């Protein structure tokens, strides 16, 4: 087993996690973000004796992909899905940078390196591998939250992007894929994982991550049952697995129901308006 040190930093916005994985004299930075000052602090946090060999994006959502400019010339690993979209200037890639620019403009955020993708992007397929120092890192494609979602395993650590967050409910892009991904992540955690890093919130033990995963499976299964019966009334009343008091989560639940194919906005909102 390679020696590994993992340091997690959380942004003031959405508790978004940026992680430095160290092995020997090298390190990998996962999802550096979000505000430029936070990213600069992250870069300063890394000891100068360490070489930043690569960055990694767990998925294309804009809050996870705009921090690479503080590490010029460093190659970036993504899923093969996102790498293809970047190469072809597809919707995933263009929409991410459009939303990042829009958000920064809304809050007067000055991002010195702008809104482009890195020059060197290395796409990984499911089961793909790469190395950082003596550390082997395995990739898993996990669609559902985003079409290009990717988790990585480094020894007994699992980095899952925007799944299993204790701060929020699932944000669904594709319900079938999301349910399948949750079951896969629970299985992966049971295969020797001790620590799980979600994209938002504190690090989790294996037991904590599996508990959240099972909660989310039950929640999404309930939405799926309602979708099978075209029952928007019951879907609207499904209890959230957590974060019920967090601003916006009730509306995210309605978005999840619509992603499952349930009735339009007016029918789903009902008494929540």
Image (cartoon, rainbow, N blue to C red):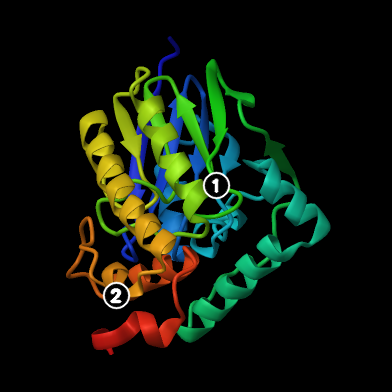
Q: Nearer the viewer, residue 226 or 194?
A: 226
What secondary structure is marked by label 1? loop
Q: Residue at x 56, y 31 (%)?
A: 139
Measure the C-alpha gap from mark 1 to mark 2: 28 Å
Residue 100: % across, % down: 56, 71
Which quadrant, please, contains the C terminus? bottom left
Q: Is residue 75 left or right of residue 62?
A: right
Residue 128: % across, % down: 64, 26
Q: Which residue is disc 1 drawn over?
A: 143
Q: Nearer the viewer, residue 235 or 26?
A: 235
Q: Earlier in the sequence, mark 1 or mark 2?
A: 1
Residue 70: % across, % down: 57, 54
Q: Is residue 19 above or below residue 206?
A: below
Q: Residue furthest top?
A: 1
What secondary structure is marked by label 2? helix
Q: Is residue 134 above or below residue 168?
A: above
* Residue 203 in view of the camera: no
Residue 241: % across, % down: 22, 55
Mark identifier at residue 233: 2
Res 13 quadrant in image: bottom left
Q: Is residue 163 above or below residue 173?
A: above
* Residue 172 in view of the camera: yes
Q: Residue at x 20, y 57 (%)?
A: 242
Which quadrant, please, contains the N terminus? top left
Tally of marks: 2
């Amino acid at each position: 087993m390679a020696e590994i040190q993992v340091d997690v930093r959380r942004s003031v916005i959405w508790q978004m996690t940026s992680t430095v994985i160290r092995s020997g004299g090298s390190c990998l930075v996962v999802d550096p973000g979000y505000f430029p000052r936070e990213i600069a602090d992250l870069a300063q946090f890394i000891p100068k004796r360490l070489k930043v060999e690569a960055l990694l994006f767990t998925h294309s959502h804009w809050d996870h992909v705009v921090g690479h400019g503080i590490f010029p010339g460093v190659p970036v690993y993504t899923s093969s899905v996102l790498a293809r979209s970047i190469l072809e200037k597809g919707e995933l890639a263009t929409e991410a940078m459009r939303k990042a620019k829009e958000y920064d403009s809304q809050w007067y955020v000055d991002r010195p390196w702008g809104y482009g993708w890195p020059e060197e992007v290395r796409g990984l397929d499911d089961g793909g591998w790469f190395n950082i120092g003596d550390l082997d890192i395995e990739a898993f494609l996990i669609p559902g939250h985003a079409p290009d979602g990717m988790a990585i395993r480094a020894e007994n650590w699992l980095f899952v992007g925007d799944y299993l967050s204790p701060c929020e409910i699932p944000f669904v892009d594709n319900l079938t894929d999301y349910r399948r991904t949750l079951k896969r992540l629970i299985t992966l955690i049971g295969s020797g994982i001790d620590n799980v890093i979600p994209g938002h919130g504190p690090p989790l033990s294996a037991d904590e991550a599996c508990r959240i995963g099972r909660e989310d499976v039950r929640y999404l299964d309930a939405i799926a049952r309602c979708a099978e019966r075209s029952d928007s009334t019951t879907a609207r009343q499904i209890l959230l697995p957590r974060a019920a008091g967090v601003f916006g989560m009730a509306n995210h639940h309605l978005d999840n129901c619509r992603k499952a194919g349930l009735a339009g906005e007016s029918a789903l909102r009902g008494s929540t308006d």
